[in-house]
Amino acid sequence: MKFQLSAALLVKYQRFSSVDEGQAACVTGGMLRSPSAGPHGFSLVDALVASLILAIAIASLAQLIISATTANAVAGRLTIATLLATEKIEELRSAPSPSTGGAGTDSPRPGFTREWSLSGIPPAPASLALVQVAVRTHATETRMFAVTRQSGP
């Protein structure tokens, strides 16, 4: 029975491989091996093909890690910029008497520039003001807007 199974595998292997008529596939312990591998292991070509496949897989993973690290750094800068903008909006909104027409610039952290302005909203009541804050870093800009009450003259 074992001989018949091995013979059937040999016939199937020869049918689907590029083995010449004069060569025979090596069937050892139920495992098929390439004819060039011999009875003791794999050939140099087999090892090179396996190494190439492994190198391609590792290169793909390295590229994925680089992309993830870059995206994480951009997300971190965006989060900090959003927090800085929110902080300035809350500071301007909580001021005892924010005046319309106020503007300014500062650098709250290295690499971040924050600009803000306080202006009236023409169709709205005179007691409302628009607060605009823009935080710039490297190649990104985060803008936030808020409406606040201002003290009238």
Image: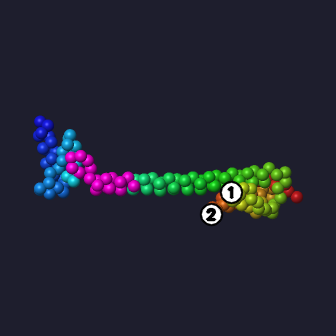
Residue in front for this viewpoint, 26 or 60: 26
Provide residue 142's location: percent of width, then percent of height: 66, 58
Provide residue 151's location: percent of width, then percent of height: 84, 54
Label disc, if present, on residue 139 of the rendered structure: 2
What residue sits 18% from the left and 45% below the top?
Answer: 27
Label disc, if present, on residue 114 of the rendered structure: none
Q: Main secondary structure of the magenta part?
A: helix
What distance separates the C-alpha of mark 2 from that of mark 1?
17 Å
Q: Which residues are magenta?
A: 37-55
Per the image, label 2 sits on a secondary structure element best described as loop
Provide residue 28's location: percent of width, then percent of height: 20, 43
Give the left or right position of residue 7, taking residue 137 as reference. left
Q: Within 10 Å of the Cα at label 2, are there few (<14), some (14-19), or many (20+) other Cα atoms? A: few
Amino acid at circle 1:
Met
The mark that comes first in sequence, 2 or 1, is 2
Provide residue 130's location: percent of width, then percent of height: 75, 58
Residue highlighted by disc 1: 144
Which image quadrant: the N terminus? top left
Would you say residue 53 sits in the magenta stretch? yes
- Of badges 2 and 1, nearer the viewer stands 2
What residue sits 78% from the left and 62% below the top?
Answer: 104
> Which image quarter: residue 102?
bottom right
> Which image quarter: residue 101?
bottom right
Would you say residue 148 sits in the magenta stretch? no
Which image quadrant: the C terminus? bottom right
Is residue 116 at least partly visible in the picture?
no
The structure's colour scheme is rainbow
Q: Within 10 Å of the Cα at label 1, are there few (<14), some (14-19), or many (20+) other Cα atoms? A: some
Give the left or right position of residue 49, taking residue 149 as reference. left
Is residue 97 at least partly visible in the picture?
yes
What residue sits 35% from the left and 56% below the top?
Answer: 52
